[in-house]
Image (cartoon, rainbow, N blue to C red):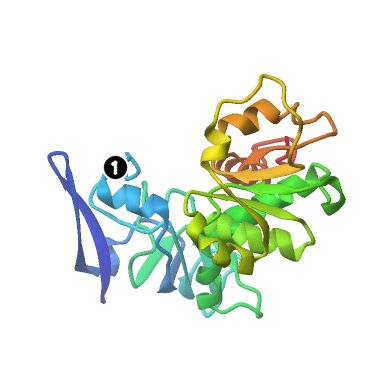
Amino acid sequence: MTFKALLATKTDDKISASVVDMHERDLMPGDVTVKVDFSTVNYKDALALSGYADVIKQFPLVAGIDFAGTVEASAYPGISVGDRVVANGWGLSQTHHGGFAQKARVKGEWLVKLPDIFSTKDAMAIGTAGYTAMLSVLALEHGGLTPARGDVLVTGANGGVGSIAIAILSGLGYRVVASTGRVEEQDYLTRLGAAQIIDRRTLAAQGAPIATEKWAGTGARGYPPNVRRQSPGARSGRRQYVTMSSIKWRQTAFSHGLMDDPPFY
């Protein structure tokens, strides 16, 4: 049986992608076959397909770092035909065919069954960005952060991760400071729940070696210079700072027994 897929190929140093017809025999090894309903387009997908970063490790490969769909065949205990599942990470679009296709075959341990409250569309509306944002919030709270401890800075506020982080944090009662390079979109950030909007350039400016603490925590894709200078140390019991990229990896490692401690700094 054939299906459509967005296949990335490489000729010399140039990566190209096109919609092709694939057969189930073209799928990679795995014990669960999924009819893919939805996937999301992430920044990492843009890096992969543009060739701007060395994301895809082998060619040809189906792009897409996540997907949600319905199980069509399974030899994995606990996952049955008809189950609705979601997957992200695990080398999808790097070393294994990803979610930009109508079918996927993966290891059962890569899949999470969706609760009844979520449709597959809901799962991908939240997507990898929402997953990453939530892991950052969980890590901050595991480290002792509460709304009473002060403001939380979210950098990259207009992006997928940042937008969802603002909504989550404000919904939990935190006062959120949103850092963005697009301050003209402050109305959007305010509607998400941000209490204050700042230009990201203020975080890049040179600061004093020792500065007064401004935020109780930060959800960031990388430490801005001033956040580094204002952080007195992760486990000091005072202010806490994490990056979303590192938290995602640490949470995954902890979940699968690769780390002894939960992901907090």
Compared to residue 253, the image places residue 207 above or below, namely: above
Element at label 1:
loop
Compared to residue 222, the image places residue 130 above or below, namely: below
Visible residue check, residue 78: no
Residue plotted at (32% across, 40% down): 53
Assess disc 1: are there few (<14), some (14-19) or many (≥20) residues with their C-alpha within 10 Å of its C-alpha.
Answer: few
Q: Residue furthest top?
A: 209
Which residue does the numbered mark 1 point to in the structure image? 52
Residue plotted at (34% across, 47% down): 47
Residue plotted at (75% across, 55% down): 175
* Quadrant of the snapshot with the C terminus: top right
Horizontal arrangement in the rendering, residue 233 relative to residue 36 (left or right): right
Query: Residue 172's x, y, as percent?
Result: 77, 62
Compared to residue 101, the image places residue 146 above or below, namely: above
Residue plotted at (83% across, 44% down): 144
* Quadrant of the snapshot with the N terminus: bottom left
Q: Nearer the viewer, residue 67 or 49?
A: 49
Compared to residue 203, the image places residue 124 above or below, namely: below
Q: Which of 174 and 139 is in front in this view?
A: 174
Asked which quadrant contains residue 246, the reply is top right
Visible residue check, residue 215: yes
Query: Residue 148's x, y, as percent?
Result: 87, 51
Query: Residue 183's x, y, as percent?
Result: 51, 55
What's under tag 1, amino acid-wise?
Tyr
Asked which quadrant contains residue 62, the reply is bottom left
Q: Which residue lies furthest to the left in this view?
A: 12
